[in-house]
Amino acid sequence: MIATQQDRSLASRIIEKFKSSYGNDPLVVRSPGRVNLLGEHTDYNNGFVLPAAINKAIYMAVSRREDTVISIISLDLDQPYTGDTRQVVSSPLHWPDYILGVVQQLQALGHPVGGFNCVFGGDIPLGAGMSSSAALECATAFSLNELFGLKLDPLTMVKLAQKAENQFVGVQCGIMDQFASMFGRRNHVIRLDCQSLAYEYVPFNTEGIRIVLLDTNVKHSLASSEYNMRRQQCEAGVRLIQAHHPEVKSLRDATPAMLEEYVAPANALVYQRCRYIVEENLRLLAASDDLQQGDIAAFGRRMFATHEGLSKLYEVSCPELDFLVEHVKGNPAVIGARMMGGGFGGCTINLVKEEAIDELVAKATPAYARAMNKELKVYIGQIENGTSLL
Ligand code: GAF
């Protein structure tokens, strides 16, 4: 479904580009980026997350070819990509890898993928922590599923999109981003248990409060190496506990007492990382109750606590993110704020009273420029549906 005028013009530009490049009518898919209210870095620890799909998306136009050629045009980049389904290898251009990784996963599962033409583009800011990569992967899985009649269910597509990122792109991400992009529902957050993959939609139409994303404009270049390292540190913590409690399979099963007893004496840094994760899971469970009871103020306080943990214990923040959270703390119109996503740049997510947004932006923009010598970008996030055919 097309949400706004801006979406409509983006989708039309992609369709026009497709027609002028390939001369036929494409099938078109919209796949959104995501926000995450709470539960950061918990997905790959089998924990809980609370994401939602948003009003920023990738649009992908595709059609079948008679041969085995893969031809891809990115609306915003000059250089087109040409490859072959008989030999899917990563591209020096890098951006085609998110698409090719999905093709490879489909092939690995024994699904026939023939040649195809593709034009894609979108308005999810790159490197801002809104998961443009997961959106691109989900757009590809959904498009190829439709195009080649593969009859895959959404969860299978989510899993293979995640695997594409793990194995082809090389980031050991969890399942949250792909899940949110595929399963998003308008005005709802998804409470996802990353262990069982059970999920429920929790209404998030909090009257008079909007999701405001403050973009540091810092691209998270450290993100993939540090991200993979955090994963290893969490696994190291699990091994230390497992020596005494073999039933503990992930940090999801660990208690604060286990961390104190087995991890803290062995490795202070690993303890710090694990403590954040165990606390964040508990925080999310409590925050879900807050939402159910309509206690948005308590929910917001937990967001600030999450930021503290991500910054001081998990150490995935950066001075710019810390500045923006500190800047809004104490503002009565800001219910909660924290860094969002993998970290080392990208956005903070803020719950802000609608009538105070303009004033907040008017103050934060010059303050950020003065302190960090960078331009602040602001997005108002609206919760939208997940990946679908246009
Ligand atoms: C990135 C990853 F892709 C997600 O899987 C998740 O771990 C997130 O960082 C942190 O919560 O977006």
Image (spheres, rainbow, N blue to C red):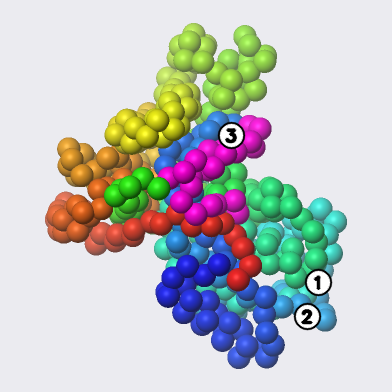
Of residues 55 and 99, which is closer to you in this image? Answer: 55
Q: Residue at x 59, y 60 (%)?
A: 387
Mark 3 or mark 1: whose residue is earlier in sequence: 1
Do residues under tags 1 and 2 come within 8 Å of each other at their CB atoms? yes
Inter-mark Cα distance, 1 to 2? 7 Å
Residue at mark 3: 193
Of residues 82 and 207, which is closer to you in this image? Answer: 207
Residue 279 to residue 341: above or below? above
Question: How many residues crowd around disc 1 within 10 Å: few (fewer than 14), some, or many (20 or more)?
Answer: some
Using the rendered view, name the quadrant where residue 375 is placed. Answer: bottom left
Q: Which marked residue is nearer to the observer: mark 2 or mark 3?
A: 3
Q: Residue at x 85, y 56 (%)?
A: 110
Residue at mark 2: 65
Q: Which marked residue is nearer to the observer: mark 3 or mark 1?
A: 3
Give x and y (percent) for residue 82: 68, 77
User: What kind of element bears circle 2?
Assistant: loop
Give x and y (percent) for residue 318: 32, 44
Q: Is residue 42 magenta?
A: no
Residue at mark 1: 114
